[in-house]
Amino acid sequence: MPKTPDIKTLHIKTFGCQMNEYDSERMAEALEGLGYALVEEAADADLVILNTCHIREKAAEKVYSELGRMRLNKERRKREGRDTLIAVAGCVAQAEGAEIMARAPAVDIVVGPQSYHRLADLVTEATTTGHGLVATEFSAEDKFAHLPQRPQGKRQVSAFVTVQEGCDKFCTFCVVPYTRGAEFSRPVSEIVAEVERLAGRGAREITLLGQNVNAYHGVGPDGRTWTLARLLRRLAQIPQIDRLRFTTSHPLDMDDELIALFGDEKKLMPYLHLPFQAGSDRILKAMNRRHTIAEYEAVIARVRAARPDIALSTDIIVGFPGETDEDFAATLALAARARFAQAFTFKYSARLGTPAASREQQVPEQVKRERLYALQSLIEDQRRAFDRAMVGRRLDVLFEGRGRKPGQIAGRSPYLQAVHVEGLEGLIGQIAAVDILAASPNSLTGVIKSGFEWHEPVQAAV
Ligand code: 5AD
Ligand code: SF4
């Protein structure tokens, strides 16, 4: 079968966090210049990128089994006369490096999270030379300076923008300082320009991303170092942007200015993701979190004083090495006191190269499972209670797309809950007041406040 070099297709499979989603979009944009267009199916793609995550358990093994499937696909396409490039990106690429090429020779490119700006060159080189290439050097600064400026991309009502990357905190369980490198903050002007471009394409909500986003300290247009609060105030001045969010924060970096902003800035949504990881001071110390439980609770009390209705979200790890029944009971007690609207719970899993991985007193799997189960049921009760408390209230909903059922549209409340209503697709991209009628396990349903008028019907933006 003859080759058709002019049509090049790209499939990106993304695992893990929102930052990986953002990175995948940027990689797709970087490859547009080479003529690559995104396709849904990996089997149809000339270039397949696996954007990996190292946080979850057995991440590397999962990548290798995925690569096994991809190799078979590559061989099948080869028999059909078509070439396939396979690239591994993300944190597993960074952590494993050349090891990936050695174990999975079908892979053509290994590219770490700080080297995506080199992707187009790597793809060209791999295509022309047929050699495997590994790029895992660290320089977030270079990356952001050299990625294309999101010229086309897809239109999104709610968009993510990475403003900070990497971490200097070195929690003893975490690979991020090793895979994403030292903390780096993008300059204010670069972020403002990116948000303005997204706003011009229909974005109404922006979520600022960073592994330690509230440690943001980027250089401002005045040459001074700006805080996250100052950056948020600047972005709030962009007229088309109605909603701002940020994630993930560290309790140590929740300064007064940022806390006050929850009360002062209407565009900053009442939602804060603030991991506490463990409920006992002893375990927090072993995790090198550098704060106590009392300090964490003092922070959330201050946040609630500034914005009483705030939805709090968190990350919690169970079964960190040395965690006793008593320590775990303290985790449950803290979760019960804090009344989270949302929480992400994890069983501790050892990450090669992190200090906690080599500690004795690893907690047996069965114990971890039981603790996770107990914690999840408490968290689920809290989440449902938070959602039920919305019934009878009127919430502003930003509509982002079609709902599950025909005739439905779906959006998000200020508290990040999914909300479904019967409504016209022309409302997508707009904010409307919705009277909440019911709370089901994963979303709210309601009706658009009668008398809501929308001007300027817009096409579905997503
Ligand atoms: N084991 C379990 N959970 C982890 N997390 C990070 N590293 C590990 C690990 N080794 C969790 C933390 C973090 C979230 C993104 O993932 O709770 O906040
Ligand atoms: Fe990892 Fe977050 Fe700790 Fe940084 S602050 S080391 S990203 S858990």
Image: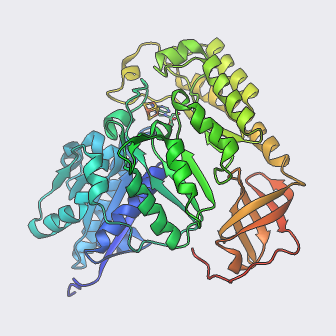
Question: What residue is drawn where x is 52% and y is 21%?
Answer: 364
> 260 and 423: which one is in front?
260
Q: Is the C terminus in the top left, top right, bottom left or bottom right quadrant?
A: bottom right
Q: Is residue 396 above or below residue 319?
A: below
Question: What residue is drawn where x is 67% and y is 17%?
Answer: 330
Q: Is the N terminus in the top left, top right, bottom left or bottom right quadrant?
A: bottom left
Question: What residue is drawn where x is 21% and y is 84%?
Answer: 3
Image-based side of 194 in relation to 396, left or right: left
Looking at this view, name the residue that lies furthest to the bottom: 2
Say if residue 210 shows up in the picture. yes
Q: Is residue 373 above or below residue 216?
A: above
Horizontal and vertical percent for residue 350?
42, 28
Say if residue 274 shows up in the picture. no
> 79 and 433: which one is in front?
433
Looking at this view, name the residue that lies furthest to the left: 129
Horizontal and vertical percent for residue 139?
25, 45
Image-based side of 87 in relation to 374, left or right: left
Horizontal and vertical percent for residue 433?
80, 64
